[in-house]
Amino acid sequence: MHISPRTEPGERLGLALCFAFLLWANWVTPLWADDYCRTMPFNPATIVRIVWGNYNFWTGRWFTTLVTFVVLDLRPYGSLAVFAVVNAGIFTFLVHVVVHMCRAVAGQAAPACRRDGVAQHVLVFLMLWWLPRTIAEVALWKTGSIGYLWPVTGEMWLLARVLSRRTDMNMAQYVAVFLIATFLEPLSLLLTLVLAGAAVRTWQRGQRVPWPLVCSHALGTLVLGIAPGNYVRQRTMVPSPPVDRLDGLLGNLGSLFDLFWLPFVALIGIGLFLGRRQVSCPACLRAGRGIWFAGLALAYMALLLMFPREALAARVSFPASVLLVCYLACLLFTCPIGRSFSMVMASGCAALVVMHMAIVVPDLTRLARISHDWVASTREQVARDQPVILPRITMGPRHKLLYVRKDIIFVGINPDPHNMLTMCFARAMGASTVRSVP
């Protein structure tokens, strides 16, 4: 399989549109929740001490924690502007990788028409935004983006190289592979298993096995997995026997699919129906080798059994959603693009963009306004040497402190002044205590 590095028709415009929106979204998204726990005066020695303590007593994700501290501690020096550009670029790069990888896996050439290329790139972006359960937690929230979007993008880049057999790298790339493998336990383990399987298959063919790549990723997985903090943290959670974990996993698996799948499935279904005379039904559903992405998504979800049920946050399923998006992208690229489907794809893409902007822009704008008002009110009350009391605000149909559509949840100010996240906010704002009231 060959993944072409050449720019496709419409790719630059499509990615530019995605980047422009993501840059705005990252810029308006405020600091939230754990972000405030990682804001302090920049001190490398203090950061290293905290990261080392977390590795031994809380979590093995040492590189994730290190990067998050550096980004947020340099906030007074413009690091958030740099983060907005970098984070938007990483999401855009994920779109690029998914498009090129899935087109090659599906065995399809790029469309000749520039408009079709733009539509396909925008559709892949919209699927990556709307199909995961908690996109803002993993793509806009500073702490969540570094912990989930960055490793998923890195592992997808690595998977694309493995599939195209471009496994020879330089030393800097091997170091990057090691660091990518230190981010997220189940995803790191899954890619290590994929690399090991690819190595065995290469050996059976009598070809040279890419041992440096396999070993660098496996070493990162090992460093992540043997961290004492993983087991210390697990002992603080409610005991979770295998049956309880399986029940939580099944609930998590079922919640990957919701009504936001319907427009994308309907659009792809129309394309497959229009091309039914060119590709048989079983073959089109396989989408070349795209069905393997669905298998990898199930394998990833199965690896979540290593976590207690209490640790199965919605954002942990993000890699599985990206793999399912890869399968849908393969199906999209399998659709023969004639004049009819080209019009359907263009009009469907335009309608989805309108829906996207109509929902996301007001929600993120309101979120930014709420955060601005909270910060301004807190500073005013601190200046008066008063206990800080903030209005409790809800968004959306569920009674969470802050809820943005599609389970885009930011934890707001808790009614309990002793809540950890509320205390982090108070410390960052120089307040003695902070609480919210209706």
Image: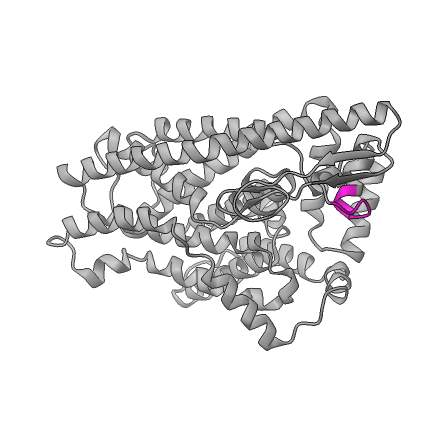
Task: Compare residues 310 and 378 and report the one nearer the observer.
Answer: 378
Could you say where residue 335 lies in the image, as x and y percent from the top left?
Answer: 22, 47
Task: Compare residues 104 and 322 and report the one nearer the observer.
Answer: 322
How does the figure colour the protein chain or chains?
A: one colour
Kindly indicate the quadrant of the structure image that contains residue 119. top left
| Viewer can see residue 229 | yes
Quarter of the image that includes the C terminus? top right
Note whether 83 is above or below 238 in the view shown. above
Judge whether residue 71 is colored magenta.
Answer: no
Task: Compare residues 84 and 434 and report the one nearer the observer.
Answer: 434
Query: In the current view of this chain or complex, which residue is farthest to the left?
Result: 277
Note whether 175 is above or below 356 in the view shown. below
| Viewer can see residue 1 | no
Query: In the current view of this chain or complex, which residue is farthest to the front?
Result: 438
Report the magenta stretch's main SS: loop
Residue at the spot 73% in from the left edge and 65% down from the top edge:
237
* 77 on left or right of 302: right
Q: Which residues are magenta?
A: 415-422
Could you say where residue 213 lies in the image, as x and y percent from the top left?
Answer: 54, 53
Note whether 98 is above or below 199 in the view shown. above
Kindly indicate the quadrant of the structure image that contains residue 429. top right
Could you say where residue 23 lies in the image, as x and y percent from the top left?
Answer: 52, 27
Task: Compare residues 278 and 315 and report the one nearer the observer.
Answer: 315
Kindly indicate the quadrant of the structure image that contains residue 208. bottom left
Could you say where residue 229 lies in the image, as x and y percent from the top left?
Answer: 76, 59
